[in-house]
């Protein structure tokens, strides 16, 4: 018995220690805190913080109110305002549920003054590098009761340790290699289409042509500038856009190609992009009759030269902030260039009427005026282009509109073009209705569901692939 007593005591001590350790291990608490970013009209910005707890929480257990009997569950040390709190189990921003293990802290934007937008983008606009975001510090002041009845103590301090980039993270980065040359491409793959399946329908491919932002890189050295600097590629991969028109979406990034804006034969980047498209059609369920090109500003010339250099590759295109004259020394060259595009595939060109970028020596017209005028020349020469101008600009678009109002405006032009059998359209935005500058018309354009739907209605009768 004397020998057994120490053993019994030891076992009791071990049991108590084990139970204590298990209790500590099972205690509810924070698993991880992350920064959430979104690509807004002027670029990628921090819009929320996501706290993941080990147990589910009822929505009413967290609150941000100083009105009695309210309470302030959280505060943050960073210079940002908290706009609202909510919980969910999906881990997705703005998905408000009654219960969940994720708590979202939505943050306000300090100012809506579009002239100060560069103060709130997460990439350095001077170095053109998107650095890792510095941590945010969150204080949980109040205790939080979980659904199981456990309590997460108050007076906690949390530090973010990761990032969630809404929609941007849904793109997968690959690298195309040709000898010493490389080109990264970022591909959105619709759910369920991760590999080729002969039992599934083929989907369209939207091919995005970026401007100089393709050279912007990030702390992962992935050259994702075309995704985080503007939302023009991201629009096509949002849940709303994919619900209406499921599609693969691709854009590219890499080191500078001096020939990117020139003719197809002189650009290794344009040629590599076409090689990538061909590879994708072999690898995934992509419909070769529904490959579409879209552009951002300076990327328009790259897109147009690729179109002309690869007949029957694309079913249609949309270009923004561009007019056919700005590439050439003479108006005759610009008119010939645009005529070739009209004969090749359906297309829709957008620009701000008083966009003063891409000026031509000796020409005092704004970009929108030049676009209107070249379209009128095309009609005089026997083509059929629908021009959103009218007699005195009454058909121009209001670039401030979004949603139903913007879609009605677009549908009116689509209907008008359909009546005249016009497969080429041009649209100018009313002066003063495009934020940042009148050059930035891609936001009003690609956010418009009717514009996107128009593109998906184009079908290539003789695809080259």
Image (cartoon, helix red, strand yellow):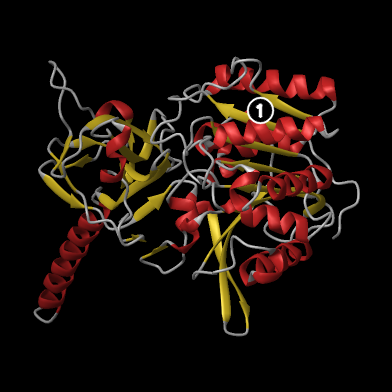
Tell me where residue 396 appears, x and y as whole percent: 59, 21
Q: Nearer the viewer, residue 316 or 17?
A: 316
| Furthest-right residue in this view | 462
In the image, residue 94 above or below residue 255: above
| Vertical arrangement, residue 126 with respect to residue 181, above or below | above
Judge by depth and name the residue closer to the eye, 144 or 380. Answer: 380
Q: Which residue is at the far bottom?
A: 179
Mark 1 — residue? 450
- Residue at point 18%, 23% (across, down): 65
Q: Position of residue 42 (x, y in %)?
A: 39, 41
**Residue lying at 73% horizontally and 49% vertically, measured from the top left:** 337
Q: Quadrant of the C terminus?
A: bottom right
Q: Nearer the viewer, residue 318 or 74?
A: 318
Q: Secondary structure at mark 1?
A: helix
Image coordinates for residue 61, horizontal then vertical, percent: 25, 29
Q: Residues within 10 Å of mark 1 (few under 14, many from 20)?
A: many
74 sits to left or right of 418: left
Residue at horizontal 48 percent and vertical 52 percent from the top:
227
> Is residue 188 visible from the viewing direction of this image?
no
> What residue sits 24% from the left and 40% below the top?
150
Q: How many marks?
A: 1
Seen from the viewer's position, the closer of residues 344 and 37 is: 344
């Amino acid at each position: 018995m004397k020998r057994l007593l120490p053993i019994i005591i030891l076992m009791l001590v071990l049991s108590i220690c084990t139970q204590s350790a298990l209790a500590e291990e099972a205690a509810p608490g924070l698993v991880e805190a992350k920064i959430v970013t979104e690509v807004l009209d002027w670029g990628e910005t921090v819009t929320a913080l996501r706290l993941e707890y080990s147990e589910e929480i009822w929505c009413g257990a967290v609150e941000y109110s100083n009105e009695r009997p309210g309470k302030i569950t959280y505060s943050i040390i960073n210079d940002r305002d908290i706009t609202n709190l909510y919980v969910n189990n999906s881990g997705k921003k703005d998905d408000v549920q009654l219960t969940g293990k994720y708590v979202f802290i939505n943050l306000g934007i300090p100012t809506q003054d579009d002239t100060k937008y560069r103060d709130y983008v997460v990439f350095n606009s001077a170095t053109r590098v998107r650095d890792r975001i510095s941590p945010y510090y969150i204080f949980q002041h109040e205790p939080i009761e979980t659904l199981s009845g456990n309590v997460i103590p108050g007076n906690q301090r949390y530090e973010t340790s990761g990032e969630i980039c809404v929609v941007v993270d849904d793109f997968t980065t690959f690298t195309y290699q040709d000898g010493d040359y490389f080109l990264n491409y970022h591909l959105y793959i619709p759910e369920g289409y991760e590999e080729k399946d002969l039992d599934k329908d083929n989907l369209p491919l939207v091919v995005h042509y970026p401007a100089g932002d393709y050279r912007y890189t990030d702390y992962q050295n992935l050259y994702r500038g075309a995704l985080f600097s503007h939302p023009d590629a991201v629009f096509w991969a949002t849940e709303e856009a994919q619900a209406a028109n499921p599609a693969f979406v691709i854009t590219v990034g890499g080191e500078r190609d001096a020939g990117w804006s020139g003719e197809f034969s002189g650009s290794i980047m344009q040629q590599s992009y076409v090689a990538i498209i061909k590879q994708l059609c072999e690898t995934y369920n992509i419909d070769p009759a529904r490959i579409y090109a879209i552009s951002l500003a300076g990327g328009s010339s790259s897109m147009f030269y690729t179109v002309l250099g690869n007949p029957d590759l694309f079913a249609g295109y949309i270009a923004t902030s561009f007019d056919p004259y700005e590439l050439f020394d003479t108006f005759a060259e610009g008119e010939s260039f645009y005529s070739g595009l009209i004969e090749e595939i359906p297309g829709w060109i957008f620009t701000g009427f008083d966009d003063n970028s891409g000026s031509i020596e000796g020409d005092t017209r704004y970009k929108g005026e030049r676009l209107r005028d070249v379209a009128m020349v095309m009609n005089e020469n026997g083509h059929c282009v629908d021009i959103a101008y009218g007699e005195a600009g009454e058909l121009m678009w209001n670039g401030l509109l979004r949603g139903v109002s913007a879609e009605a405006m677009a549908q009116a032009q689509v209907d008008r073009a359909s009546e005249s059998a016009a497969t080429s359209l041009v649209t100018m935005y009313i002066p003063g209705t495009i934020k940042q500058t009148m050059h930035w018309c891609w936001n009003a354009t690609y956010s418009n569901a009717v514009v996107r739907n128009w593109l998906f209605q184009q079908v290539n009768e003789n695809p080259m692939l």
